[in-house]
Amino acid sequence: MSDTILETKHLTKEFKGFTAVNDVNLRVQRGHIHALIGPNGAGKTTCFNLLTKFLVPTAGQILFNNRDITAAKPAQISRQGIIRSFQISAVFPHMTVMENVRIGLQRALGTSFHFWKSERSLARLNDRAMELLTQVDLESFADTMTVDLPYGRKRALEIATTLGMEPELMLLDEPTQGMGHEDVSRVTELIKRVSAGRTILMVEHNMNVVSGICDRISVLQRGAMLAEGTYAEVSANPQVMEAYMGT
Ligand code: ADP
């Protein structure tokens, strides 16, 4: 199998004449934690929306495992193993943490209603949900109402729900945004842990997180790819420094 899991070729998105993503060639290597960074308005969110097919590109191609997925529908994308972390709003606040993970799993398995009538199936579902909660250190919060979870723990719940869908490539939208130092460390460590055996592409603003766990970094500026490389490489790039200082 090729080392490249995800590739975009000349990916472009225009909004009424404004080019938000401009001829982007992105290459993500299998097994890596890859960061997509750039000043506000650089086109990171638009890129994610193109990758998950929330938006249709104006031009260019998206290849996943060497297969052209440019014309695929969002549901086909997730079936193929590209899963974007759920937004917090997609987690049901008035259900327990365990219930949220179970619902996510049921949805991911797509099994029929009758399947869950069997006690054995339910027990398996509960076991898997508990396993996922343990993976993200939320086992002691299993019976907590989601609305009562501290903010950092909600992101961990999102990650658990995403893991339940068995992603081959996980897309994380600013996973540490709005967090205090302690939560940032916890979530960073968690991302590192769950990256074993999969690939992660994340939009992240916190450079300590990027330098700490990301293997490769792609820098966008005004829709175009400005630089790509390791943290040491991109942080030493004068154009990257200028792009950040200029904001
Ligand atoms: P980032 O995530 O890097 O902050 P975005 O991808 O959100 O950047 O936005 C890139 C540019 O595209 C911005 O200038 C933004 O205003 C513009 N943009 C994003 N979505 C739309 C849209 N639906 N219509 C018009 N312009 C948009």
Image (cartoon, rainbow, N blue to C red):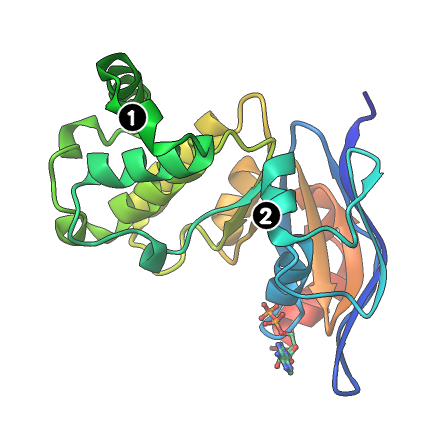
Q: Residues within 10 Å of mark 2 (few under 14, many from 20)?
A: few
Question: Relative to 40, is 116 on the left or the right?
Answer: left
Q: Report the Cα–Cα distance between label 2 and label 1.
A: 23 Å
- Residue displayed at 49% across by 47% down: 208
Helix, strand or loop at label 1? It is helix
Sequence order check, earlier mark of 2 and 1: 2
| Label 1: few (<14), some (14–19) or many (≥20) C-alpha neighbours in 10 Å | some
Between 185 and 31, the one nearer to me in the picture:
31
Q: Is residue 132 visible?
A: no
Residue furthest out toward the top: 120
Q: Is residue 201 left or right of residue 21?
A: left
Q: Residue furthest front?
A: 114
Disc 2 designates what residue?
A: 75
Front label number (2 vs 1): 1
Residue 140 point in image, percent of width and height: 15, 28
Q: Amino acid at mark 2?
A: Ala
Element class at badge 2: helix
How many marks can you see? Answer: 2
The numbered dot on residue 81 is: none
Q: Residue at x 47, y 47 (%)?
A: 85
Q: Residue at x 34, y 47 (%)?
A: 155
Percent of width and height locating residue 82: 61, 41
Position in image of residue 233 (x %, y %) = 74, 46
Q: Report the front residue among 116 and 32.
A: 116
Q: Which residue is mark 1?
A: 116
In this picture, residue 194 sits left or right of residue 48: left
Ligand 1 image-quadrant field: bottom right
Residue at image location 25% in from the left, 24% down from the top: 117
